[in-house]
Image: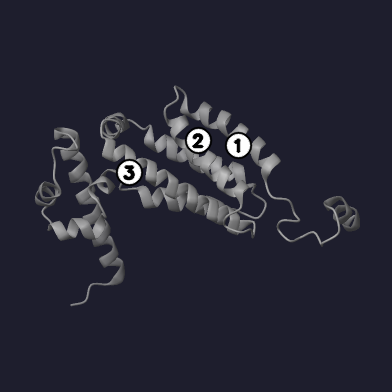
């Protein structure tokens, strides 16, 4: 009997979540370095190969929402309405992610990460990857080359805003304060209309604006 696609996806997601929850419980109880993948697999009642079919590494077990966070950030750019400005859309998403990370029960996980060089290194590489994906999404939204410096810079600022606000005494207020600076930087550094190909060669933006009046 073939399992319907929807049911198959739900079963796969449930297995992944079970593995992640089991791993995190073991890590918090005994320490990250004291627990091996085989122990995680045995406790979750799955094969070691099943663990690795869902998670590329042991570190990824701790950051099991990594891909979801990255997708949410890029979709905050690509799925916003035509009249919704870029920076406020990103601020809304970062605020939601910060609230998730600072929710009750998050402190032990943060300590687990801070006490492990391997997890800190993984988190650093994860943040760089998120920044690259976000920069690509911003550039695509503005029809610019992926290497556009302004897009990469603002993306890095946005990713750093998450970690800075998460560590603040008042995370919500920190998000607002940080994004005021990000918005000011974007207003100065964002690519001109000429860079997006909307101003004909030999004319200034002022010329274009005058013509359109």
Q: Which residue is mark 1?
A: 182
Which disc is residue 38 wearing?
none
Q: Is residue 141 visible?
A: yes
Q: How many tags in the picture?
A: 3
> Crowdedness of circle 3 by 10 Å Cα count: few (<14), some, many (20+)?
some
Whether pointer 1 and pointer 2 mark residues with C-beta atoms closer than 8 Å, the reply is: yes
For the residues carrying marks 1 and 3, which lies nearer the camera in this image? 3
Which disc is residue 161 wearing?
2
Residue at the spot 75% in from the left edge and 54% down from the top edge: 193
Q: Secondary structure at mark 2?
A: helix
Residue 164 vs residue 138: left or right? left
For the residues carrying marks 2 and 3, which lies nearer the camera in this image? 3
Colour scheme employed for the rendering of this structure: one colour
Of callouts 1 and 2, which one flags the residue occurring earlier in the amino acid sequence?
Answer: 2
- Residue 170: percent from left, percent from top: 47, 24
> Crowdedness of circle 1 by 10 Å Cα count: few (<14), some, many (20+)?
many
- Residue 142: percent from left, percent from top: 64, 56
Q: Which residue is mark 3?
A: 122
> In this rendering, is residue 55 above or below 178?
below
Position of the N terminus, as image quadrant, is bottom left
Residue at the spot 18% in from the left edge and 59% down from the top edge: 50
> In this rendering, is residue 190 above or below 120?
below
């Amino acid at each position: 009997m073939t399992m319907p696609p929807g049911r198959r996806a739900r079963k796969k997601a449930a297995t992944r979540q079970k593995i992640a929850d089991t791993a995190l419980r073991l890590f918090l109880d005994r320490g990250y370095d004291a627990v091996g993948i085989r122990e995680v697999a045995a406790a979750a009642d799955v094969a070691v190969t099943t663990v690795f079919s869902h998670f590329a590494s042991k570190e990824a077990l701790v950051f099991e929402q990594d891909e979801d966070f990255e997708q949410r950030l890029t979709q905050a750019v690509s799925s916003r309405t035509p009249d919704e400005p870029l920076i406020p859309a990103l601020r809304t998403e970062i605020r939601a992610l910060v609230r998730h990370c600072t929710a009750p029960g998050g402190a032990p996980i943060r300590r687990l990460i801070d006490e492990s060089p391997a997890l800190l290194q993984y988190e650093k590489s994860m943040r760089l990857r998120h920044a690259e994906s976000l920069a690509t999404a911003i550039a695509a939204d503005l029809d610019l080359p992926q290497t556009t410096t302004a897009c990469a810079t603002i993306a890095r600022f946005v990713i750093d805003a998450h970690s800075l606000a998460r560590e603040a005494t008042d995370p919500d207020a920190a998000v607002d304060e940080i994004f005021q600076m990000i918005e000011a930087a974007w207003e100065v550094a964002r690519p001109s209309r000429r860079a997006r190909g909307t101003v004909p060669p030999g004319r200034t933006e002022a010329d274009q604006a005058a013509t359109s009046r």
